[in-house]
Amino acid sequence: MESQPFFPVPTRPRVERRTSREMFPLVEQWLESGERQQDFCQRHGVKIAVLGYWLKKYRSENVPDQSSGGFVPVKVLPTPEQPIEICYPNGVTIRAGMGMSAKFLR
């Protein structure tokens, strides 16, 4: 029987696992820095994909989900002294003029 040549299977380099305790402060630092992700990652020796992964985890754990469409309680006084303006993150603005009843606003 002829022996087949042996070709070693390349092994993947060991990936250093990071924890939220290590990465969340870095994510917060980037959020406060105002830098582009590319520049920040290059300066800190982190891959952009790694920062993106941890940014997503950070937001899912620390920022309330605004896409759920849930209501936020609003305290309405019986007679507003000033016009009311509600601005949503998607750009929709609701304005209510003076003299509008609290019953209507509810």
Image (cartoon, rainbow, N blue to C red):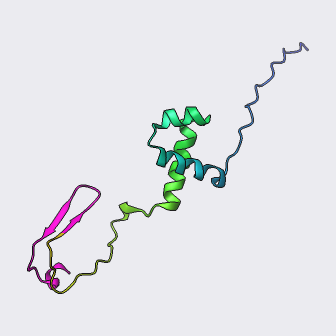
Q: Nearer the viewer, residue 6 or 50?
A: 50
**Horizontal side, residue 102 vs residue 17: left or right:** left
- Give the answer, above or below, for where 40 lies relative to 60: above
Does residue 89 show up magenta in the picture?
Answer: yes
Quadrant position of the N terminus in the picture: top right
- Give the answer, above or below, for where 100 lies relative to 47: below
**Horizontal side, residue 39 vs residue 24: left or right:** left
Question: In the image, residue 26 lies at what x, y percent?
Answer: 58, 47
Q: Residue at x 67, y 47 (%)?
A: 18
Residue found farthest to the front: 81
Q: Residue at x 49, y 56 (%)?
A: 59
**Residue 93 position by quadrant:** bottom left
Q: Nearer the viewer, residue 36 or 3?
A: 36
**Residue 104 position by quadrant:** bottom left
Q: Residue at x 29, y 77 (%)?
A: 74
Query: Total marks drawn?
Result: 0
- Give the answer, above or below, for where 83 lies relative to 78: above
From which residue to which does the magenta span run?
85-106
Residue found farthest to the right: 1
**Residue 102 position by quadrant:** bottom left
Question: In the image, residue 101 lies at what x, y percent?
Answer: 12, 83
Q: Nearer the viewer, residue 96 or 71?
A: 96
Does residue 67 show up magenta in the picture?
Answer: no
Q: Nearer the viewer, residue 70 or 8?
A: 70
Quadrant position of the C terminus in the picture: bottom left
Question: In the image, residue 2 lies at what x, y percent?
Answer: 89, 12
Q: Residue at x 62, y 34 (%)?
A: 45
Question: In the image, residue 66 lies at what x, y percent?
Answer: 37, 62
